[in-house]
Amino acid sequence: MFYGEFKHSIDRKGRLILPAKFREVCKEYRIDRFFLTRGLDKCIFMFTEDEWHLQEQKFKTMSFTKQETRSFNRMFFSGAVDVVPDKQGRFIIPEYLKEYADVKKDTVIIGVSNRIEIWDRKSWQSFYENSSGSFEQIAENILNL
């Protein structure tokens, strides 16, 4: 559903704009509400409302008697906030999520199929540089092609 890599900056009012391609997807699928939360690798995860509820159901099936499950759920859900972009596709990222992901002004917004990730531009560049060299090896390890 969401694909691509887009560079955007947070405006002086603290708003970030969804890339035009993502706004087209939102219009096509009548998506008007998202959930943001702490992501992995120091990014911010952004889920559509439907996808958020699917993820929530998955986490509900995990045993809360396990310390790792409790810790992950606390970090994931305590960081969650719902946002409704305005007509131009702008929305505000809460300060605590920007601090978590070290997002200041310049961002990279990437589509990862069922979610969107928001990265600080320098953090994304570092991640990309560190990961791109092992792309084939990772594919070999996780894909059965």
Image: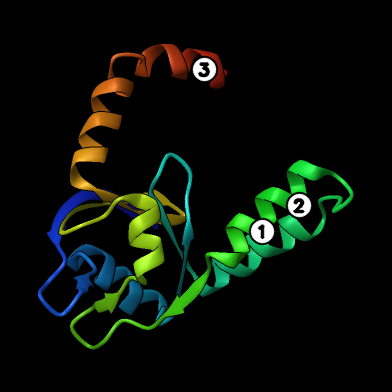
Q: Earlier in the sequence, mark 3 or mark 2?
A: 2
Image vertical order of residue 116 relative to residue 135, above or below: below
Residue at 34%, 74% (x, y): give it.
26
Q: Is residue 99 left or right of residue 114?
A: left
The disc at residue 70 is: 2
Q: Position of residue 62 (x, y in %)?
A: 81, 51
SS for dot 2: helix
Residue at 30%, 50% (x, y): give it.
102
- Residue hosting label 3: 145
- Residue hosting label 1: 74
SS for dot 3: loop
- Disc 1: CA contacts within 10 A as few (<14), some (14-19) or many (>=20): few
Marks 3 and 2, Cα distance to the nearest angstrom? Answer: 35 Å
Q: Position of residue 133 (x, y in %)?
A: 29, 14
Residue at 24%, 30% (x, y): give it.
126
Image vertical order of residue 96 relative to residue 121, above or below: below
The number of callouts visible is: 3
Q: Earlier in the sequence, mark 3 or mark 1?
A: 1
Image vertical order of residue 56 relative to residue 129, above or below: below
